[in-house]
Amino acid sequence: MERPTKAMIERDRASAALGMVVDHDEPGRAVVHMVVRDDMTNGFHITHGGLVFALADTAFAIACNEDDRITVAQGADVTFLKSTRAGQTLTATAVRRARNGRSGIYDITVVDETGDAVAEVRGRSLATDRTLPEPPPGR
């Protein structure tokens, strides 16, 4: 059975625009990193929380697409633990905690380059009956 993650990652323009790199991809586990740029900081010159969450969400998406079913997030909770700044590298590791039927629970930890926890996310997934859409014309 083929996982949809390769096509999903190749089509993920948002993650690509943010410079995310997939370091590890296996069913139930994924590791993704990005370097924080100046344009990723907020008015306090710290990394925008939405972009920290976006990194976690990308790792979550890769980990939860474990089989040929397209799986999406049905919810997530985030706790921010440490601020970071431009130039730092953030790494998100997503790990399956439970999967039963169409539902799954995944824990995602985001750390900085020193290994300090930046954020913890608990994601809830839902496997769908969707099929991978065709790419838009010209891509």
Image (tube, grey):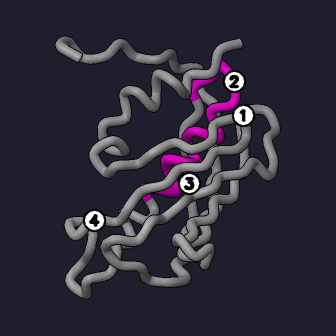
**Disc sitting over residue 137 in the figure:** none
User: How far apart are labels 4 and 1 at the CA level?
Assistant: 30 Å
Mark 2 neighbour density, 10 Å: few (under 14) some (14–19) many (20 or more) = some
Q: Residues within 10 Å of mark 3 (few under 14, many from 20)?
A: few
Q: Which residues are magenta?
A: 54-70
Q: Which residue is mark 3?
A: 75
Label 4 crowd (10 A; few <14 / some 14-19 / many >=20): some
Number of the front mark, 4 or 2: 4
Q: Earlier in the sequence, mark 1 or mark 2?
A: 1
Q: From what the image shows, is residue 25 above or below residue 134? A: below
Residue 89, position as x, y percentages in the image: 45, 65
User: Disc 3 residue type?
Assistant: Gly
In three-dimensional space, the C-alpha distance between marks 3 and 2, rounded to whole angstroms, equals 20 Å
Q: Earlier in the sequence, mark 3 or mark 2?
A: 2
Of labels 1 and 3, the one closer to you: 1
Numbered circle sitting on residue 67: 2
The chief SS type of the magenta part is helix
Total marks placed:
4
Query: SS of the residue at dot 3?
Result: strand
Q: Contact (CB < 8 A) between labels 1 and 3? A: no
| Amino acid type, callout 4 | Arg
Which residue carries the number 4 mark? 37
Which comes sooner in the sequence, label 1 or label 3? Answer: 1
Question: Which SS class for mark 2?
Answer: loop
From this view, report whether residue 31 is shown above or below residue 78: above
Residue identifier under label 1: 27
Residue 60 is one of the magenta-drawn residues: yes
Q: Residue at x 63, y 45 (%)?
A: 30
Real-space Cα separation, disc 1 to disc 2, in angstroms: 7 Å
Q: CA distance from mark 4 to mark 2?
A: 34 Å
Q: Residues within 10 Å of mark 1 (few under 14, many from 20)?
A: some
Assign a secondary structure to mark 1. loop
